Image: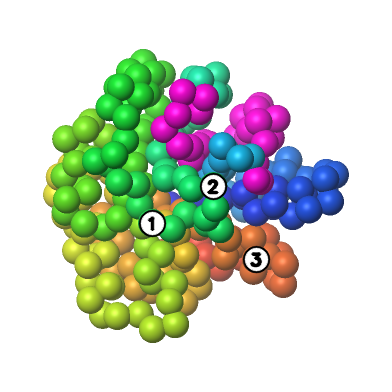
């Protein structure tokens, strides 16, 4: 598995003071030195962490492929077409949510907007994925709608009590998505302890981790946190 690091919450800390500390470009340099595989940023409609300026600056200076998480809106499609990230992941958004609460309901997305984004992605060689719950229904829909990649929501592993059925479902759906010739990523709520529950690693392309890595970095540094996580996903 490759490692993608989401740096949204570095921007959250910076925005608390409205200044430029901690600096995102400095964080980018640390991530590059730690040799992560993908840099993830989520440009939300309410701009609660990453701002438009951040996205353009990161694109300018990053030597790491950028994974842009975004809602399927006309505004975000226009921004994505200007940025030309290596990856785009369509995610659900609610204004009152603290964080992403689950996968995207592909039954409710705009077919017209998706077709437009698929056309742009195909023309610019952008890998387009859908952030979905680990179910056959959503995986089949993603495949039928033209996505080449899915990111399976692993938030249910971030619980005090983790059911064996939850672990089994995630791993079975990783294998199922792979059998459908989809590139499979996983993400949300993963940490040093629960990453061990991802058993079907040979079918996973990239694991995306954000909040935990930035939080743990407060105590042991960003570089060390990334290195520990990389070692854990190789086991």
Report crowding for label 3: few under 14, some 14 to 19, many 20 or more residues within 10 A (C-alpha). some
Which label's residue is closer to the chain start, 3 or 1? 1
The residue labelled by disc 3 is 215
Quadrant position of the N terminus in the picture = bottom left
Question: Given the current orientation, which residue lies at the most extreme front position?
Answer: 96
Q: Quadrant of residue 82?
A: top right
Tell me the tag on residue 65: none
Instruction: Tell me which residue sits at (27%, 35%) in the image.
Output: 147
* CA distance for labels 3 and 1: 21 Å
Quadrant location of the C terminus?
bottom left
Stretch in magenta: 48-76
Q: CA distance from mark 3 to mark 2?
A: 23 Å
Q: Residue at x 56, y 37 (%)?
A: 45
Residue 122 seen in render: no
Q: Residue 117 at x, y = what percent?
A: 37, 23
Which x, y percent locates residue 214? 64, 60
Query: Which residue bears the numbered disc 2?
Result: 95
């Amino acid at each position: 598995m490759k490692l993608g690091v989401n740096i949204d919450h570095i921007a959250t800390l910076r925005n608390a003071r409205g200044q430029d500390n901690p600096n995102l470009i400095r964080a980018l340099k640390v991530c590059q030195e730690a040799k992560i595989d993908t840099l993830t940023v989520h440009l939300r409609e309410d701009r609660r962490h990453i701002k438009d300026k951040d996205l353009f600056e990161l694109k300018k200076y990053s030597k790491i492929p950028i994974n842009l998480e975004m809602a399927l809106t006309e505004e975000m499609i226009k921004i994505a077409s200007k940025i030309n990230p290596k990856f785009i992941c369509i995610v659900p958004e609610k204004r009152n949510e603290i964080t992403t609460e689950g996968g995207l309901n592909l039954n409710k997305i705009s077919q017209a907007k998706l077709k437009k984004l698929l056309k742009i992605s195909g023309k610019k060689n952008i890998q387009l994925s859908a952030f979905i719950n680990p179910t056959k229904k959503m995986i089949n829909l993603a495949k039928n709608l033209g996505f080449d990649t899915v990111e399976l929501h692993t938030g249910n592993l971030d619980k005090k009590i983790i059911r064996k059925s939850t672990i089994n479902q995630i791993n079975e759906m990783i294998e199922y998505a792979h059998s459908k010739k989809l590139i499979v990523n996983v993400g949300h709520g993963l940490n040093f302890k629960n990453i061990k529950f991802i058993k079907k690693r040979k079918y996973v392309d990239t694991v995306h981790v954000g909040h935990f890595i930035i939080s743990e970095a407060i105590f042991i540094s960003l570089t060390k946190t990334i290195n520990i996580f990389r070692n854990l996903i190789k086991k």
